[in-house]
Image: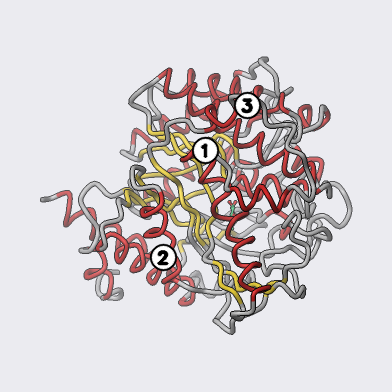
Amino acid sequence: MTTEFKGAADLAARFPAGFTWGAATSSYQVEGATGADGRGKSIWDSFVNEPGRVVDGSNGDTAIDSYRNIAGDVATVKALGLNSYRFSLSWPRICPDGDGRVNPAGLRYYSDLVDALLAEGITPWITLYHWDLPQALEDRGGWPVRDTALRFADFALIAHTALGDRVKHWITVNEPWCAAFLGYASGEHAPGRREPAESIAAAHHLMLAHGLAARAIKAADPEATVSIGINFYPVYAATDAPGDLDAARRVDGVQNRWFTDAALRGAYPEDVVEDFKALTDFEFILDGDMELINAPVDVLSVNYYSRFTVTGNGGSASASAAPTGAGSAWPANDHIGFVPAGLPVTDMGWEIEPSGLTDVLTRLHGSYPGVGLAVTENGAAFPDKLDDGRVKDPERLDYVERHLAACADALDSGVPLVGYFAWSLADNFEWAWGYTKRFGLVYVDFETGERIVKDSGRWYGDLVRRARTNREAE
Ligand code: FCB
């Protein structure tokens, strides 16, 4: 394996000692066992049963069976030589009704997973919310309702009380943009509502949930590293026409600044507030909310995949959109179109721009200098084929290599980047795209559950081993 991947040595040498090397997954995408051991229903269990919501009509009932295969997951992380693993907790597995009633079997699964990881020297990074809201809370209004944020704070404390003795890295909410606007505006994701005004309330309550959970965890363990996961995109105007420049400001505002300014500055960006006034009077923002949202954040979790070019003249939906969506995922911005820039794309249709990751990281460091940064998701779907026991995926290998070089460039310019997690550890259920998109470093035969490390995974493992051997020896 070592002679095959020559470039890895130089790249490995560009990362500092103590760097976090990981891969990521999320509960609904990998666990399966949706009816097992007292787990409650999540909004994804309901959504997948509605005809036309998932392109291949599939669901996460089995997924890649992680709930029943702790040993297999840990062995996979270990086979890649990683020192960290990011996974999420299924809220309804732990709190089946979304309230304070705890399902001990749910907690036990995560506790066992944590123990198994630690026994192999692998550091767990836990995401508390990766989109699987208890259906019981959606029945009471979901994220547009304030109480959901309060219930989330309770859940965060329950999880931290059970696991916080061993788990020090906590990401509160993953990609509130997706949860709010794909869930409640475009309807591409669960719960599939198309209510633009309500989606803005949902976005606020997701941030309130983050603030309350971050504060609860910090109060319980001042040593904990608290984070929020946000998906960032460089946004370019298609031309210098005023309408296109304004479109770029608007998309950058909703996508990149809305959530970070709230979390790290305690205020929503004024220009986006003005744009959203077309839809809402913000009566859901109560006195004191912004202070609560502005909770201490140790590390900002950066999820990075692609870039956008936008026009104010309407046009196509974002390439991120699933074909199942109808509404716009850009509330108050329906006139904005997304145009291809002619770059190579992944199997998602997402344009590949590694330098955009350097730009995002340096810009975030410039805007919010006091906070550490981690890339907590980065990766690409390609239509992999298992051929004679091997998966050759040169496009994914190239994607990961170039994005890691982009991380190294950011480190060179002084960005306090502490880690990188590939999305994903293994092929899994890709939301509205079902099992039609493969993001894993490890191939999964969805019929048999068999796992085979792809060439990209072997390359990444080789790089990580080199980086860890070089640096941990120092
Ligand atoms: C991110 C999600 C993750 C996965 C990747 C491809 O937006 O957080 O669950 O679907 O995209």
Mark 2, other Cα within 10 Å: few <14 / some 14–19 / many ≥20: some
The residue singled out by tag 2 in the image is 359
Of marks 1 and 3, the one in the foreground: 3
Which sits in the foreground, 172 or 102?
Answer: 172
Q: Tell me the residue that label 1 is attached to.
A: 127
Mark 1 and mark 3: span between their CA atoms?
13 Å
Asked where in the image residue 339 lies, by quadrant, the reply is: bottom right
- Where residue 218 appears, as percent x and y from the top left, is 42, 24
In the picture, measured across the screen, residue 286 lies left or right of residue 164, that is right
The part of the image, by quadrant, that contains residue 12 is bottom left
Judge whether 458 appears above or below 286 on screen: below
Secondary structure under tag 1 reads strand
Where is mark 3, residue-wise? 152
Q: Amino acid at mark 2?
A: Asp
Mark 2 vs mark 3, foreground winner is 2
Which sits earlier in the primary sequence, circle 1 or circle 2? 1
Callout 2 secondary element: helix
Mark 3 close to ligand 1, CB under 8 Å: no
Instruction: Identify the residue at horizontal 47%, vertical 28% (top origin).
Output: 112
Spot occupied by residue 127 in the image (x, y as percentages of width and height): 52, 38
The kind of residue tagged 3 is: Phe
Viewer-proximal residue among 315 and 108: 315
Image point (69%, 30%), residue name: 36
Tell whether 208 sits left or right of 424. right
Q: Residues within 10 Å of mark 3 (few under 14, many from 20)?
A: many
Determine whether label 1 and label 3 are within 8 Å by CB.
Answer: no
The local crowd at label 1, few if under 14, some if 14 to 19, many if 20 or more residues have their Cα within 10 Å, is many
Q: Give how far apart the Cα atoms at labels 1 and 2 are.
A: 25 Å
State how many labels appear.
Answer: 3
Q: Is residue 404 left or right of residue 275?
A: left
Q: Do we see residue 383 in this rendering?
A: no
